[in-house]
Amino acid sequence: MGVTLRQIQGFLAVAETGAFTKAAARLRIAQPALSQLVRELERDLNIRLFDRTTRRVELTEGGREFQRAALKLMQDLDLAVAGARNLAARKQGRIIVAAPPFLAATILPRAIVRLQSDYPGLQVIILDINTAAILDAVRSGKADYGFGTFPASEEDLDRIRLSRDRLMLFCPLDHRLARRKKIRWNALAGEPLIALTRDSGIRLLVELGYEGAKIPLRISHQVSQISTALALAGAGQGITIMPSYVRPEAARQRLASVPLFDPLVSRDIELVRARDRSHTPAGLAFAEVLRACIRNDEAPAV
């Protein structure tokens, strides 16, 4: 039989009070039961812990040595319990989140500020990498969560759906399409397009939109980053088509944003985690904050 927590608690109570009667009263157990706990502990340790007299119980040399170790053990246990409770209460913890550069530079900073306002003990570490690298980081454990849009075929991921965004037209405020409330894809025929490179999931969705409208792409610039495409559109180099979550940044570039339909091209924004790892309270709190930040961005288009 191994040493139990109850035995250690009984031993420490006797060591502190110097009497089985007082220790039993503190622990709210019968004195014979406490005596039995201490005898079992001495037997398990194969050492005498107390010298018993008619008036007092005193620690042996071995008992004093064990008391120091037992006190340290109980302090560590108390800290572990408090830490677990703080995690459950979302008071502390660390989350490593992998996200594409644009999301890492726009939505994540606002989410972190809000999270740390609500839960000051939570720390968020950002890995700004591409989607393929995000999935590798999540699977390997380098990142706790991935934030972005991911193929439905990735079945080994546990997903928290945060929002569903749609592709929108972004163009200068004086563009002929800027004042429309919504636009069919075929209205884009002949417009010079600032597109992302074909390794981007956004580019593939844009191609689906053009194919659905049966119009050809007329690419004027091809870039790797969303921020570059928006800047070029702001400089009058063409239109660009991006997810709705870029609207706050597009507004800073003085670009109009107009929803596209016929076809409606949309996708889920998700927080993903490896399926063999459980969600933490800190991670779930972060998901709530991210969802709120994205919802705040879903205001009517400019």
Image: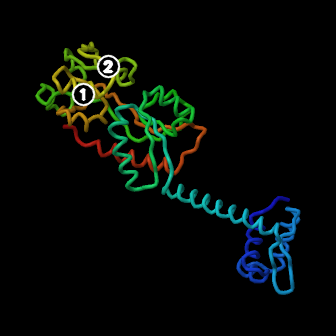
Q: Say which mark, if any, is on residue 261.
A: none
Which secondary structure, mark 1? Answer: helix
In depth, the one of 17 and 79 nearer the eye is 17
Q: Which residue is mark 2?
A: 212
Which residue reaches farthest front?
Answer: 61
| Residue 244 position in % (x across, y down) | 29, 34
Left or right of 261, for residue 282: right
Residue 243's quadrant in the figure? top left
Residue 146 place in picture, x, y as percent? 47, 36
- Colour scheme of this structure image? rainbow
Element carrying mark 2: helix
Residue appearing at x 44%, y 47% in the figure: 286
Residue placed under numbered mark 1 in the picture: 230
The quadrant of the rendering that contains the C terminus is top left
In the image: residue 281, left or right of residue 204: right
Q: Residue at x 16, y 28 (%)?
A: 172
Residue drawn at x 73%, y 82% as measured from the top left:
25
Relative to 133, is 285 above or below? below
Q: Nearer the viewer, residue 244 or 210?
A: 244
Q: Position of residue 67 (x, y in %)?
A: 75, 67
